[in-house]
Image: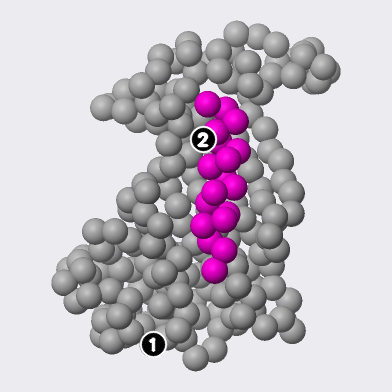
Amino acid sequence: MEIGLKIQDIVLIGLFNPSKFDRYTFIKNKIFKENDISDTSVFLPELVNIETDMFNVILNNNQLIISSKVDSNNDISGVLIKVLKSIDKINLNASGFNFRYFIEPIYEDAEIDAFVKTQFYNPSNSIQSNFFNSETSSFGFYCSKDFKNTRLKLDVKPILINNIDINKKSVQFEFNFHRDYDINDDSLSELNNLIKNYNSYKLESEKIIKKLL
């Protein structure tokens, strides 16, 4: 099966002040060049939504989300570093580095069904074997572990995707490297330490995906 990384983003949960982030802020702090910022971008007191060819940045009072528009882009952490340098103080509750992989839409539905049952059906599981052992059943799984000062959560589930106006079966592999911050933590310092290791989180997701290939 060919499995590709299609979505990667970084999500911060906390208290933010979007009114301090106008177009000039992103240009002055060399986060983006002026020509990079699309005319469709929005700068309001309670919402910033920046569109570039490479990234999408959403900032509101409770969230900062940086998404990559390019599958293989490794610069998303660099954008976050520049954004954080432009913030005087941050009240951070949680952070998440997210990577979503999908089976490429080149397979027939029957091939996806066979892959799902081979990989995720457990005959020793009495619930699956007694209640979900049928042609219409589908399977996934969830697991988690500690990994480099985060909690890695992996959620695998069959989905339907639209491919040239046709719904085709696929499988989504969603990796979330989550970190909570206590109010007494030096959250900005803790977050910067995680960002320095951003590629190690991405590599861990790649290592796990390779086991399925």
Image point (32%, 23%), residue name: 166
Q: Position of residue 3 (x, y in %)?
A: 46, 31
> In the rendered view, does 59 fall on the left or right side of 184?
left
- Residue 77 quadrant: bottom left
Residue 20 circle label: 1
Front residue of 69 and 200? 200
Residue 63: say if magenta. Answer: no
Q: Nearer the viewer, residue 212 or 57?
A: 212
| Residues drawn in magenta | 196-213
Q: Indicate the secondary structure of the residue bearing disc 2.
A: strand
Which residue is rendered at x = 43% and y = 27% of the image? Answer: 2
Q: Report the disc number at residue 172.
A: 2
For residue 205: magenta?
yes
Q: Is residue 19 above or below residue 207?
A: below
Q: Amino acid at mark 2?
A: Gln
Is 92 displayed left or right of 125 in the figure? Answer: left
